Amino acid sequence: MPGLEDLYREVILDHYRNPRNRGELEVPPALLAEGFNPLCGDEVKVYVQLDGDTVTDVRISGQGCSISQSSASMMTTAVIGRTVVEARDTLRSFKQMMSIHEHGLDRHESPQDGSPEVPSGLGDLEALRGVVKFPVRIKCATLGWNTFDQALAEAHP
Amino acid sequence: MTLDVAAVKADFPLLGREVHGTPIVYLDSGATSQKPQAVLDAMNRYYETINANVHRGAYHIAELATTASEDARRSIGRFIGATDEHEVVFTKNATEAINLVAHAWGRANLTEGDVVLLSLLEHHANIVPWHQLAKERGIEVRWIPLTDDGCLDLDDLDRLLQDVKLVAVTAVSNVTGAIPPVRRLADAAHAVGALCLVDGSQYVPHLATDVADLGCDFLAFTGHKMCGPTGIGMLWGRRELLDAMPPFLGGGEMILDVRQDGFTPNEVPWRFEAGTPPIAEMIGIGAAVDYLEGLDMEAIRKHEVSLTNYALRTLDDRFGDDLLIHGPTDTAHRGGILSMCLREIHAHDLSQVLDQHGVCVRAGHHCAKPLMRELGVTSTSRASLYLYNDESDVDALGYALEEAARFFDF
Ligand SMILES: Cc1ncc(COP(=O)(O)O)c(C=O)c1O
């Protein structure tokens, strides 16, 4: 049985207590998208500032649980300063990590048994890997990311 | 009669199981109740001994199935004080029952400029069908506001009732447990020539129900919250209203005759029950109300009031201002529903920790977003009590909440 410590890793609680890059940006020039989690009523706003192809700033506002808030906070630190292509790569890796449960919930704990490769290079974000053991929380973890993706789609369809 | 809760608990097989290595503490009956053995047995007995389609075959078991399912209609009618069992229409759930009224009665009777008056306590099931009709017909959806303590603010009721054709209100809030004065609203509606629909989803399972006392014209409720199976709901309506209403869905069962150029609808209530009905579920909900009646609804309400008082008192002792419980504090005007916010801990996180201790509560907006906005929250953790809960369940909740406060510790 997965325990609470699988879900609430220290890095996650840190980002929840001290969220990075909270706030708003002026729209325009910034892009804005709003995301909803219909299950719990959480709402998140993601502001994205682009300079050409580079994500120069991201700000998060809205309310959510520790998982959605910390995931969005970690996302900001992972994508600020990256190009749009790089940011989308990270997004894809992250969502791949979040969909591992579809291949079998507990198998990724022992990679030698032939389970799919866990995407690496996600840094702190890998702390969120435990979320896949709590399937109803996956939507929380991906809320900020999907909203970020929507904002990007305005400028780079 | 007083309720022997230990004996009641033993009637519900699921309550004997464990989760995460501890006995389950089921506090989510507001979402769906557990089912007693008697209901499971009745449904199994149908499938094992008399499974046949109803109103069709002239053979023995088909007659037994028809009788058993129609007996269930009679039990439901008796349970809510209906004088005529044909006033009970079976639907899929409360949501479909309200949609039935919106489609069949609403489409035939509401035109542009008419007003449907809702309260801010409503579940989406009693909001969205009216929004849909507003879009289609140009009717207005108007709202009864709330007082600071979460009751209906009826100071301006006369003005609110202008041009109103239907007052549609819940009898118990599924978020705060608030019990609004339904009788007063029904009388006020009738005084201006309007009708009154009551959403009894959280009322009928918990309080002795008499449609004449409620004074309403329609009552919608749902089987799975009252010890019955999923897939069955009920609409009670006054006979002359149902008789005048056109059908809802079309197909078999709901017709007297079908010709190349049209059809003649069946009588009430079958007119509103197109297709093969959920026969096992009808039999199951019949067994559920027999079970509840056997225990006595007054005794169940008394038990829930005293348990709710116990919960409000002991949780306040443990947490004081750290734990906010929404809704009225006087249990004479509330059901056993406790929507909680513990400090700044998000409802999702709170219920996750509770789950580790086997405590099942609901986290989220409870399908009542207009109310949540009024309360100024996006989500709460909701514990809801029923006949099989006891003080040990409330104590387990208190303990698990303390563990959550310790875990998040800020
Ligand atoms: C007050 C209220 N109305 C309506 C409903 C809808 O019930 P159902 O989903 O069974 O149609 C619910 C339950 O979720 C409820 O609590």
Image (cartoon, grey):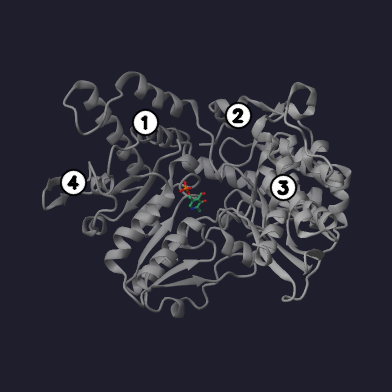
Q: Disc 4 on helix, strand or loop?
A: strand
Determine crowd level at label 1: few under 14, some 14-19, many 20+ residues with C-alpha closer than 10 A. many
Instruction: Say whether disc 1 or disc 4 marks the residue closer to the N-terminus.
Output: 4
Q: To which residue does mark 3 refer? A: A92
Closer-to-camera residue (B210/B70)? B70
Tell me whether circle 2 and circle 3 mark residues in contact (CB < 8 Å). Answer: no
Determine crowd level at label 4: few under 14, some 14-19, many 20+ residues with C-alpha closer than 10 A. some
Q: Chain of mark 4?
A: B
Per the model, the C-alpha gap separating discs 2 and 3 is 42 Å
Q: Are marks 1 and 4 on the same chain?
A: yes
Q: Position of residue B314 (x, y in %)?
A: 75, 46
Marks 3 and 1: which is nearer the front? 3
Marks 1 and 2: which is nearer the front? 1
Tell me whether circle 3 and circle 4 mark residues in contact (CB < 8 Å). Answer: no
Closer-to-camera residue (B380/A57)? A57
Q: To which residue does mark 1 refer? A: B280
Determine crowd level at label 3: few under 14, some 14-19, many 20+ residues with C-alpha closer than 10 A. some
- Residue at image x 76%, y 59%? A84
Residue type marked 2: Leu
> Disc 1, ligand 1: is the CB inside 8 Å?
no
Asked if residue A50 lies left or right of residue B161, the reply is right
Closer-to-camera residue (B45/B102)? B102
Give the quarter of the image for residue B147. Answer: bottom right
Residue type marked 1: Ala
Instruction: Say whether disc 4 or disc 2 marks the residue closer to the N-terminus.
Output: 2
Up the image or down, B4 lies above or below B336; here it is above
Question: Is residue A1 among what the camera can see?
Answer: no
Marks 4 and 2: which is nearer the front? 4
